[in-house]
């Protein structure tokens, strides 16, 4: 989706999106965390003396690893990521963007507003860029969603040869975020993408924090 | 890509793909590990007495975690995944599929053969389904590629506001694998997908094992 203006505090993202693109029922609208945080006024001024590090500590509920300036920590939502999601790119100098307080709710608000403004029934994914252990490079994952089952459960279904599937819960919400990143890039000022033609059975209720964040009790790496 | 026959040992995958789809220069052809392993005869018969566990041990160079039947280990390629990539789905009963010995080479062979058979210059990605720590559900990632820079380095480039980017190396090869999974599914007998319209600057040389696998010395979780 091209042509979106710079987003500022209080902007109605859905209205801005609806103005520059034609949406249809069944579309998945992927919106980057950055513009959601801007619209929700999650920008904070940095004290030039101390920089963004106190923010990282404040946004972290548990630190998993530190190396040099890098902190891998868990946020209040349960996301494990670098610098607790505190981000200095694509925001004004001297400012940092924090993650939305409740990104699933952010997605629902955009979805509801799109229904209201345009009369379309879409799903919305809020995406962010996370690193991974063991693999170099970052990819986009979902931090919030609405109107979508984030994980499609194939348990009990059969493979193409009729054998019961072993690996059975597919995080389609993260694959949608990754697919959207391919056309959004990191620096092109394209913070919204539309994925068309997804399997209609994926629509439904669910959230990233409830359904994708792994409970620490069943997590082998926390 | 629909209409691919069951793949068997020794099959020329490129020839099978070329027969059922029209490829163009600049396409990215994503092929699942399963059919590559079948074509490369990486299927092994299971001893019904002991099952697949000895295979998992043999394919592992280091075990990171065990819980019940689940083993998270590192393969000889350096991939960290469940059961060392030993897979029982979509293969005949009593059989397991191992990962290709050199998946980047597998990708190159398919790419070279597509150039030979069809005269097209495409990139090829071999994908597999991995779990993630901290997040539920699986997603597809790349285990091999050819003709593609697996990680696009944006270091030194600027964001949309002219500030130097912080998060700068994007694993597009994994995002391409994830995007392809959205149309392939797990049980639909669709082991090949074509991604069209990717940024031409992403074409080039590189491999997943060399470029994406994180060196243990810089890995905070190994």
Image (tube, coloured by chain):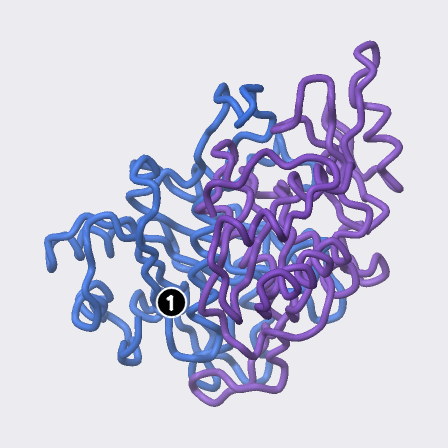
Chain colours: A blue, B purple
For this rendering, which residue is in front, A14 or B79?
B79
Q: In this view, does B166 lie above or below B15?
A: below
Q: Is residue B113 above or below residue B70?
A: below
Residue for point 50% across, 23% down: A155
Instruction: State the quadrant of the N terminus of chain A.
Output: bottom left
Question: What residue is shown with label 1?
Answer: A42
Where residue A29 sits: x, y (%)? 31, 57
**Image quarter of residue B145:** bottom right
Where residue A121 sits: x, y (%)? 19, 48
**Disc 1: which chain?**
A
Q: Is residue A199 above or below residue A39?
A: above
Where residue B205 sits: x, y (%)? 71, 73
Q: Is residue A63 visible?
A: no
User: Position of A18 compared to B172: left or right?
Assistant: left
User: Position of A14 compared to B188: left or right?
Assistant: left
Instruction: State the quadrant of the C terminus of chain A.
Output: top right
- The residue lying furthest to the bottom in this view is B162
Residue for point 59% across, 68% down: B119
For this rendering, which residue is in front, A121 or B179?
B179
User: Position of A171 compared to B63: left or right?
Assistant: left
SS for callout 1: loop
Residue for point 41% across, 41% down: A150
For this rendering, which residue is in front, A100 or A170?
A170
User: Position of A27 compared to A45: left or right?
Assistant: left
């Amino acid at each position: 989706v091209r042509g979106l203006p710079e987003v500022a505090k209080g902007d109605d993202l859905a209205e801005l999106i609806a103005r520059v693109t034609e949406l249809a029922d069944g579309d998945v609208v992927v919106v980057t965390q950055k513009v959601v945080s801007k619209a929700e006024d999650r920008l904070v001024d940095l004290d030039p003396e101390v920089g963004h590090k106190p923010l990282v500590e404040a946004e972290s509920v548990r630190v998993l690893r530190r190396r040099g300036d890098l902190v891998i920590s868990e946020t209040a939502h349960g996301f494990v990521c670098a610098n607790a999601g505190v981000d200095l790119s694509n925001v004004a100098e001297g400012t940092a963007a924090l993650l939305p307080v409740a990104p699933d709710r952010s997605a629902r608000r955009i979805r509801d507003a799109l229904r209201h403004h345009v009369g379309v029934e879409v799903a919305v994914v809020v995406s962010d860029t996370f690193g991974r252990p063991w693999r170099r490079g970052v990819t986009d994952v979902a931090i919030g969603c609405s109107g979508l089952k984030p994980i499609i459960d194939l348990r009990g279904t059969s493979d193409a040869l009729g054998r019961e599937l072993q690996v059975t819960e597919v995080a389609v919400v993260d694959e949608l975020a990754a697919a959207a990143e391919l056309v959004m890039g990191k620096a092109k000022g394209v913070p919204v993408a539309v994925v068309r033609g997804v399997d209609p059975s994926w629509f439904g209720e669910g959230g990233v924090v409830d359904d994708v964040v792994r409970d620490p009790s069943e997590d082998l790496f926390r």
